[in-house]
Image (cartoon, rainbow, N blue to C red):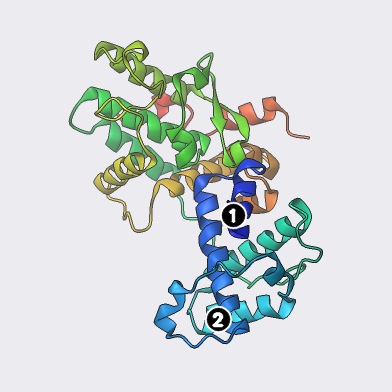
């Protein structure tokens, strides 16, 4: 059965490039929208604007894409702005996706002879400083979790999760995937990041202690790994791996209890907090922070304005939240 060129592209992203499912899904939506735009404009389709999302993309094959010009991509950018009313940031993301799509078809998959999006300019977006918790606010959040009412098992679990976020700057998906076997000698974590790239994340004293306290509670509650279907480190009340959504919901609850506006602060802001505190207090250069966060490009890390493992380890240990005894107020 013949597949559509979009399916071939998405399969290539997943299999050859190791793209995460969320990334594949985003590319699917963006490329599909561009293909609908091509049919709308090139074929002069007479449809109601509300029916745009119903345009069939099946006719958009390789031969069709060979007729796409640089001007078509520029016209798409204008369409996104004037008709779809997309923000600059959204247009930047969509045009970047189309540029990557054609680059992959022409260079990676070698299906097109020319790339019509080559050197196409992306909409300019203003760089915003990341929102993050100050050191005092981070300590307040941890103290709020530590003093929360309820089961010690889930209190120690939540405390360990937030401690790891604040000290190591993991992504939500990375933390959710942690297995017990990923903890190496209690001092490091094996993390599977974007593009299924592995990296080692070092655990300072705060992280080590919080994980140990949680695992001790698990043992006291007879939640040993042998009795579970999964080997996940962090478990839900149903003794299953905590999903990213469950972790997100839990953190929102503690942020709210600590008095933070959850419209402003989120799980991802804890990652920003870790990066900022490491950079501000850890005497680390930007490339060390890049390695800790698992950023592919240092340009991404620059918003926090050859690294060896000792440098990375020291940066984690120099985080001001590294000492568990310093976190609790008398």
Q: Residue 213 location, x and y as percent?
A: 35, 18
Given the current orientation, which residue lies at the most extreme left position? 150
The quarter of the picture where the C terminus appears is: top left
* Nearer the observer, 147 or 232: 232
For residue 305, say whether it is visible: no
- Label 2 sits on residue: 40
**Separation (CA) of disc 1 from disc 2:** 22 Å
- Label 1 sits on residue: 3
For residue 153, side relative to residue 135 (left or right): left
* Nearer the observer, 137 or 7: 7
- Residue at 43% from the left image edge and 34% from the top image edge: 176
Label 1 crowd bin: few (<14), some (14–19), many (20+), radius 10 Å = few
Earlier along the polypeptide chain: callout 1 or callout 2? 1
Q: Residue 227 location, x and y as percent?
A: 31, 13
Q: Is residue 51 above or below residue 273?
A: below
For residue 259, side relative to residue 209 (left or right): left
- Residue at 71% from the left image edge and 72% from the top image edge: 121
Callout 2: SS: helix
Q: Residue 161 location, x and y as percent?
A: 39, 32
* Nearer the observer, 76 or 182: 76
Number of on-image labels: 2
1 and 2 marks in contact (CB < 8 Å) = no
* Nearer the observer, 231 or 109: 109
- For marks 1 and 2, give the one nearer the viewer: 1
- Residue at 71% from the left image edge and 56% from the top image edge: 104
Q: Which of the 4 image quadrants contains residue 128?
A: bottom right
Q: Which of the 4 image quadrants contains residue 264?
A: bottom left
Q: Which of the 4 image quadrants contains residue 226?
A: top left
């Amino acid at each position: 059965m013949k597949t559509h060129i979009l399916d071939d592209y998405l399969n290539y992203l997943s299999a050859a490039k190791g793209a995460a499912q969320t990334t594949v899904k985003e590319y699917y939506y963006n490329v599909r929208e561009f293909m609908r735009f091509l049919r709308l404009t090139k074929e002069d389709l007479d449809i109601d604007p509300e029916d745009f999302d119903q345009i069939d993309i099946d006719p958009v094959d390789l031969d069709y894409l060979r007729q796409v010009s640089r001007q078509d991509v520029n016209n798409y950018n204008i369409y996104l702005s004037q008709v779809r009313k997309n923000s600059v940031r959204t247009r930047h993301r969509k045009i970047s996706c189309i540029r990557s799509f054609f680059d992959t078809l022409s260079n990676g998959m070698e299906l097109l002879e020319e790339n019509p999006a080559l050197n196409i300019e992306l909409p300019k977006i203003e760089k915003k400083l990341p929102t993050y918790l100050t050191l005092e606010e981070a300590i307040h959040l941890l103290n709020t979790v530590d003093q929360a009412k309820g089961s010690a098992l889930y209190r120690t679990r939540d405390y360990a999760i937030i401690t790891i976020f604040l000290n190591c700057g993991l992504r939500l998906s990375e933390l959710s995937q942690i297995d017990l076997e990923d903890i190496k000698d209690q001092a490091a974590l094996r993390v599977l990041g974007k593009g299924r790239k592995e990296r080692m994340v070092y655990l300072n004293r705060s992280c080590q202690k919080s994980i140990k306290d949680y695992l001790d509670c698990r043992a006291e509650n007879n939640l040993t790994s042998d009795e579970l279907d999964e080997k996940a480190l962090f478990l839900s009340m149903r003794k299953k791996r905590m999903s990213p959504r469950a972790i997100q919901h839990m953190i929102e609850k503690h942020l709210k209890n600590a008095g933070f506006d959850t419209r402003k602060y989120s799980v991802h802001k804890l990652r920003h907090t870790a990066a900022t505190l490491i950079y501000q207090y850890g005497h680390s250069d930007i490339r060390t922070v890049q390695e800790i966060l698992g950023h592919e490009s240092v340009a991404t890390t620059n918003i926090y304005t050859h690294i060896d493992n000792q440098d990375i380890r020291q940066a984690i240990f120099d985080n001001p939240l590294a000492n568990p005894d310093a976190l609790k107020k008398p």
